[in-house]
């Protein structure tokens, strides 16, 4: 693509975005608002991602009104470092976060994403789980709604069960403190079904708070940055009965590789799942419990989809959609029995690939891209779309050019690491390579083996590819950024 074509398309997108706003004091076009929607542990298995079983009409309409990223990846498949990376603009390897607060390892002068907007005259509001912990980044927010964080007691932060049954509420502490393993205490269940009204659940409360904030923000008239973070489908899977009833459990087949033989490479032991009282403390997941979890995961997606729909409806009713960028993201993927594994702390495609979609006023509609993008790219993208000067430390790349040309050449790789920051993964157009300090590496041909069933790392015929990807992994993200002048 020639420079003139690329820039013309980019300018067209930006012009349409800014021209959709009202004028401020008759002097300049108002900057667009931002509605940033985070969803915890959500796989890209929505209807808009080609999954017909899943009922996700509200998120599907966001995709229909904008650009869907089919190959988007997190930097760490774990809530805390993933969110820290996105909001700080630093990659996890740079932050080396192993304790809270999330941004505690960032340099003192770091300007976070909400801080940038607040410093530039935006009203910044956080509702629900945006960062992982309750009190992170206090300077970033004009207002914060953190009531759902307190639902499990003062000894919990970053986890909100949504349990309604007294028995589960009485035993949730055993889960959170790992007491099931320490002293044999009973632990709460991984699923729960009740007739609870949506508005009485944590995610329903988050939706209502976001709706109330939109009304306040519309009345105030100033540009806003509203971040709303929803908990489900993070475990426990506590969607109300009516969302379970959208599906028949018999329709869910276990993954074809559910009973794949162990190859001897040490990975995660899905301890996050094993802490629940009705899951096995060791060994494989029973098939009936596996289907129950898969059913609950689908129900939880439809449940949170409905809550997000309430926020989108209010945005439209207030006519704020005319000048609001809507960006939806998930912090990591989640294993649903693939290779007999569950949960997320893994560098596999199932854990690293996430949901990402953006709707920009005047921008593309019903478009998709296979460009490799990363969560770290959200910060520079929103800064560019809102005409804010980003700080120089950002380690992501604005994907605004993809709004004008979704098929243009882009990054050559995306990078993911574990919380130890030494087990790293690189995802290219065709391959995923996982490197471990132990030398027990993995190589998968995503073109011919999308389920990652066949590890090619030790095959003689693959050694040239292994060496190439090892070199790219060591060269790092700076060598993978797209050419800016094509």
Image (tube, grey):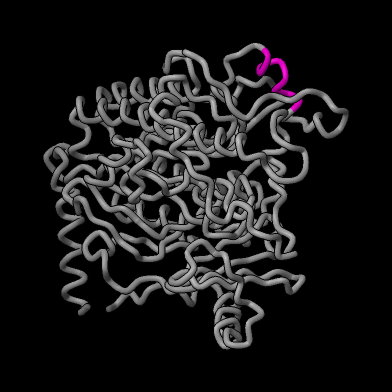
Res. 429 in view: yes
Q: Main secondary structure of the magenta part?
A: helix
Residue at left 24%, top 49%? Answer: 66
Using the rendered view, name the quadrant where residue 460 is placed. bottom right
- Asked whether residue 182 is drawn in magenta, I would say no
Residue at left 77%, top 38%? Answer: 281
Residue 33 sits above or below residue 168 on the image: below
Residue 30 sits above or below residue 125 on the image: below
Foreground pick, 344 / 290? 290
Foreground pick, 235 / 111? 235
Using the rendered view, name the quadrant where residue 76 is placed. bottom right
Residue projecting furthest to the left: 26
Foreground pick, 252 / 300? 252
Range covered by the magenta-colored residues: 167-174
Query: Does residue 447 appear left or right of residue 189 in this picture?
Result: left
Residue 80 sits above or below residue 208 on the image: below
Residue at left 28%, top 46%? Answer: 63
Q: Position of residue 32 (x, y in %)?
A: 25, 43
Using the rendered view, name the quadrant where residue 210 is placed. top left
Q: Where is residue 216 in the image (x, y as percent from the top left)?
A: 31, 22
Residue 136 sits above or below residue 196 on the image: below
Q: Position of residue 107 (x, y in %)?
A: 61, 54
Q: Where is residue 278 in the image (x, y as percent from the top left)?
A: 69, 29
- Figure label count: 0
- Which quarter of the rendering shows the C terminus? bottom left
Residue at left 48%, top 60%? Answer: 394
Res. 137 in view: no
């Amino acid at each position: 693509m020639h420079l003139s074509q690329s820039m013309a398309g980019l300018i067209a997108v930006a012009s349409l975005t800014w021209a959709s706003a009202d004028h401020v004091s008759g002097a300049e076009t108002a900057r667009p608002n931002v509605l940033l929607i985070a969803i915890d542990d959500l796989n890209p298995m929505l209807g808009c991602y080609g999954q017909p079983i899943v009922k996700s009409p509200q998120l599907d309409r966001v995709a229909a009104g904008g650009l869907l990223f089919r190959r988007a990846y997190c930097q760490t498949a774990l809530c805390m470092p993933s969110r820290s990376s996105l909001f700080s603009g630093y990659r996890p390897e740079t932050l080396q976060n192993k304790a809270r607060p999330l941004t505690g390892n960032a340099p003192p002068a770091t300007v976070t994403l909400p801080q940038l907007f607040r410093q530039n005259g935006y009203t910044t509001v956080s509702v629900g789980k945006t960062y992982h912990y309750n009190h992170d980044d206090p300077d970033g927010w004009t207002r914060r709604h953190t009531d759902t964080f307190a639902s499990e007691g003062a000894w919990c932060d970053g986890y909100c069960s949504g349990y309604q049954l007294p028995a589960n509420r009485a035993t949730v502490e055993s889960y959170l403190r790992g007491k099931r393993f320490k002293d044999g205490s009973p632990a709460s269940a991984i699923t729960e079904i009740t007739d609870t009204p949506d508005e009485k659940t944590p995610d329903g409360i988050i939706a209502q708070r976001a709706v109330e904030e939109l009304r306040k923000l519309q009345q105030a008239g100033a540009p806003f940055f509203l971040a709303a973070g929803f908990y489900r489908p993070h475990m426990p899977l506590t969607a109300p009965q009516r969302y379970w009833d959208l599906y028949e459990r018999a329709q869910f087949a276990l993954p074809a590789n559910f009973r794949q033989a162990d190859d001897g490479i040490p990975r995660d032991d899905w301890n996050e799942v094993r802490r629940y009282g009705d899951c096995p403390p060791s060994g494989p997941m029973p098939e009936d419990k596996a289907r129950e979890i898969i059913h609950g995961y689908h129900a939880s997606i439809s449940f949170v989809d409905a809550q997000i729909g309430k926020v989108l409806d209010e945005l439209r009713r207030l006519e704020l959609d005319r000048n609001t960028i809507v960006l939806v993201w998930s912090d990591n993927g989640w294993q649903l029995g693939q290779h007999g594994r569950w949960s997320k702390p893994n560098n596999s495609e199932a854990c690293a690939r996430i949901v990402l979609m953006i709707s920009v006023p005047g921008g593309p509609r019903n478009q998709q891209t296979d460009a490799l993008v990363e969560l770290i790219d959200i910060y520079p993208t929103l800064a560019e779309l809102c005409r804010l000067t980003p700080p120089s430390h950002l380690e992501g790349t604005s994907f605004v050019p993809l709004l004008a040309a979704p098929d243009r050449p882009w990054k050559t790789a995306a990078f993911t690491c574990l919380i130890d920051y030494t087990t790293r993964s690189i995802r290219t157009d065709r391959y995923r390579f996982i490197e471990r300090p132990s030398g027990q590496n993995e190589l998968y041909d995503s073109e011919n083996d999308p389920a990652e069933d066949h590890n090619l790392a030790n095959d003689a015929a693959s050694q040239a590819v292994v060496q190439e990807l090892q070199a790219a992994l060591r060269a790092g993200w700076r060598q993978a950024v797209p050419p800016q002048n094509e």
